[in-house]
Amino acid sequence: MRKYFLIAFLTALILSSCSTVQQHDKYQLLSTHPENKNSIHTLEMKASVVIDMPELNNSANTNVMIAGSDSVSMVLHGPLGIPLGRMFSSEKELIFYNIFENNVYLGSPSEENLRRAVNLPLSFNDLVKILRNETPADPEEYKVSDYKSEKGHVLFENNTGEYVEYSLINPADSTIVQYQRINKDGETVINVYYSEYSDYDGMKLPAIIKAEFPEFEGKLTIEIKKYTLNSLDKSGLRFDYPANAEKIYL
């Protein structure tokens, strides 16, 4: 009887130790999820952009200017540096000026309005977070998943009730490899891939950002040629458009 009791006790002890180690490992892995880049107050990017959507297939060069997480401005150029359009968006306002057609879209920066104005099915927050190389939700809202990656990457998940989002992290340098959002019906809303990281003032940022939008059969590819951190004059983000431009209210 004592023999069986000892075996049962040792078995329970071993299982308890394994569980403790697993929980300890998960606690350690939590620290590998990158924090928001709060030290980046302003961010400038010189990049090429390819938009592949059913209603639009185009490429352009762009200068992107971001102030914190509050506002973003883009200038789009075609071949030979010919200006094509300009966009400004804050949390409450969206302005997109189409230079060729001399019309300007005005409204709130909702996902629907951004798609109508610039053909991107993204909300303002999604756009800014993707460009800043951050997860849309706060890092502390994610928990470590049980998924095991062959490359040693760590999968984090966050269930908001409306959707589940995942961030795949390289624990070696705490960089985001992939971000994915899945709705309540199990359908993928967005997939974002980050690659070719380099160091900028002690901050790792990707040279390639690829986003997929399965619902709209669309893709967005951004190839960043240059980053500039914390040297932007914020007053230059918002712009004036011609008085004779046709106004389209969203």
Image (cartoon, rainbow, N blue to C red):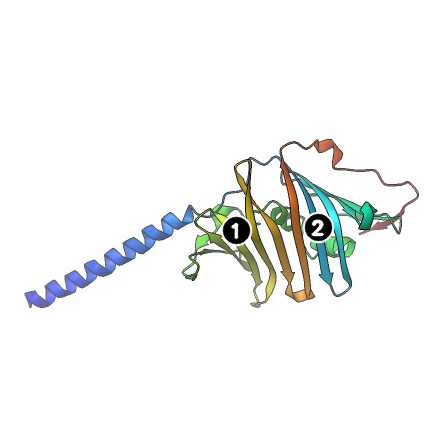
- Check the image and name the residue furthest to the left: 2
Residue located 81% across and 50% down the image: 79
Residue placed most toward the observer, 93 or 44:
44
Q: Foreground mark, 2 or 1? A: 2
Considering the numbered disc 1 on the image, is that residue within a helix, a strand or a loop?
strand
The residue located at (66%, 52%) in the rendering is 222
Residue tagged by mark 2? 48
Q: Is residue 94 visible?
A: no
Amino acid type of disc 1?
Ile
Residue located beneath label 1 in the image:
176
Callout 2: few (<14), some (14-19), or many (20+) C-alpha neighbours within 10 Å? Answer: some
Instruction: Tell me if residue 2 can be seen.
Output: yes
| Neighbours of disc 1 within 10 Å: few (<14), some (14-19), many (20+) | many
Instruction: Say which element carries label 2.
Output: strand
* Residue 42 place in picture, x, y as percent: 64, 36
Q: Earlier in the sequence, mark 2 or mark 1?
A: 2
Q: Amino acid at mark 2?
A: Ser
As drawn, the residue found furthest toward the front would be 80
Where in the figure is residue 143, as x and y percent of width and height?
44, 53
Residue at image location 37% in from the left, 48% down from the top: 28
Q: Position of residue 146 (x, y in %)?
A: 40, 60
Instruction: Kindly indicate whether the residue at mark 1 contacts the one at mark 2 (C-beta within 8 angstroms).
Output: no
Residue 219: x and y in percent read 67, 61
Horizontal arrangement in the rendering, residue 223 relative to residue 184 (left or right): right
Residue 216's place in the image compared with 84, above or below, is below
Identify the residue shown where x is 32% and y is 56%: 22
In-image side of 3 versus 217 (left or right) = left
| Front-most of residues 85 and 196 | 196
Location of the N terminus by quadrant is bottom left
Q: Is residue 19 above or below residue 39?
A: below
- Residue 212 figure quarter: bottom right
* Spatial separation of the CA atoms under disc 2 and disc 1: 21 Å
